[in-house]
Amino acid sequence: MPDPKTGELRGNRNLKRLDRITQTKQEEETARSLELGLEAADSINDRSISLFSRGHQPAFAGINTFMKSPYCEDIRNVGDYEAAFVGIPFDTGTTYRPGARFGPQAVRQISALYDGFSVDGAVDLHEELDLCDAGDIFVIPGNIEKTFDQVTKAVSYIYTSGAFPVLMGGDHSLGYPNVRGIAPHIDGNVGIIHIDRHIDMQEMDMDERMHTTPWFWTSNGHNHEGQDVSTSHHSHSHMHDVGLNNCPPKNLVQMGIGGWYGSRPGSEVARERGSSVLTMTDIEELGIKKAAEVALDLAWKDAKAVYLSFDIDSIDPGFAPGTGSPEPGGFLPREALELVRLIAREGLCGMEVVEVAPPYDVNQNTSQLACRVVLDVLGTLVTEGKLGHRSAVTKKE
């Protein structure tokens, strides 16, 4: 909105802000492209163009990493970066239609469209954030529990290295092992904001920990009165890790829940444990800004950190058809992007985007929205000083 004092439009203010950001990385990339990709043909007037594509341009060329960021092949060096995109191509936990294992590659492909520069957000991620693509975690397609162990160990490694984990699924069963890789390293409670059309909080589904179960296992097995509600867990031989003791259900906020593809068992768990459920009707009545405020208050109450879990099926399937369990009546894209930006303002310990299933997508719309969720979160974290190195690349006025 216009500045109340000067009347200057937000876009014009942001253009001035962006003009103060150096272009050092862009200049270094051009020099590197010319060195490694050789000089272009003599007929090319723009001598910043190389013979072989080695940088961000053109968007349709090159080897796909997320945002064409550096590929951290030696994962021991991931701590040299401020954020790491990590693919988790696993969809064995789906209960309706699979395909989310192809999500990370699809998001990488469409991400080449973007260069990280946003006038609306007043941010240049290419210059202000050291981002890498850490590749994919080696999952075990036929074994949920072994995959969970792989994921938890990998996410733990990324997080403790100091890089902000951007986790791209894969189905939503990954919510539990993802948080299990982060929460033990945080000295205090961890809040979780879960944006989804489905409550995903039942104990088991078809006798396994499927994508309908992550928040049952993440929350610590106590209800809002402090009573133990986890006695049934021990009948399962592989359920030795019952809950995370610093992820209490009082700090679990589920947003966008609704429709008819629900879960009575999961809903009963949410009621018993006292987690907070904001349905789409709640959010429509409150408005996006107020709903975000409510969610943040609940998730951050007595917590040291908050984790964001974004299921792409929270967006109406008219805009995001490429998902395993579509449910009409979800967010419009602009609403979803505003919501994640508002949530990210307070800072996050990690994020995941799940349930992108390219086999059902149209024109890459779903993959593009997943990419935008990541970019809008990262951009907000940078502008709010929660991530990146803005001050180091900003010229003084």
Image (tube, rainbow, N blue to C red):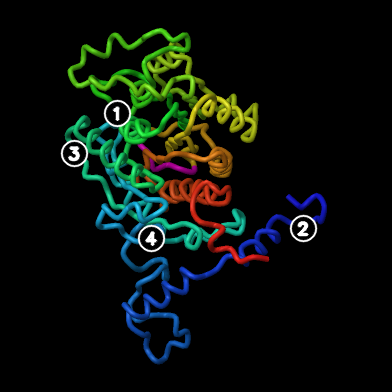
Label 1 amino acid? Thr
Depth-wise, is mark 1 or mark 4 nearer the camera? 4
Q: Which residue is mark 3?
A: 140
Q: Which residue is mark 2?
A: 8
First of labels 4, 3 by sequence position: 4
Q: Residue furthest right?
A: 5
Q: Position of residue 298 (x, y in %)?
A: 55, 25
**Which of the two labelled residues, at mark 1 and mark 2, occupies the earlier sequence position?**
2
Q: Residue furthest front?
A: 187
Question: Gap between marks 4 and 3, in whole Å?
Answer: 26 Å
Foreground of the two, 233 or 327: 233
- The kind of residue tagged 4 is Ser
Contact check, label 1 and label 2, Cβ < 8 Å: no
Q: From what the image shows, is residue 82 above or below residue 321?
A: below
Which of disc 2 and disc 4 is earlier in sequence? 2
Tell me the residue that label 1 is attached to. 95
Helix, strand, or loop for circle 3? loop
Q: Which picture quadrant has residue 150?
A: top left
**What separation in Å lies between label 1 and label 4 (alpha carbons)?**
34 Å
**Residue 30 at x, y percent in the picture:** 42, 76
Q: Write the start and end of the magenta stretch as one range.
A: 319-324
Left or right, residue 352 beside residue 139:
right
Provide the residue designation for mark 4. 69
The numbered mark, 1 or 4, whose residue comes first in the sequence reads 4
Q: Estimate the spatial distance between the alpha carbons at disc 1 and disc 2, rounded to whole Å.
A: 51 Å
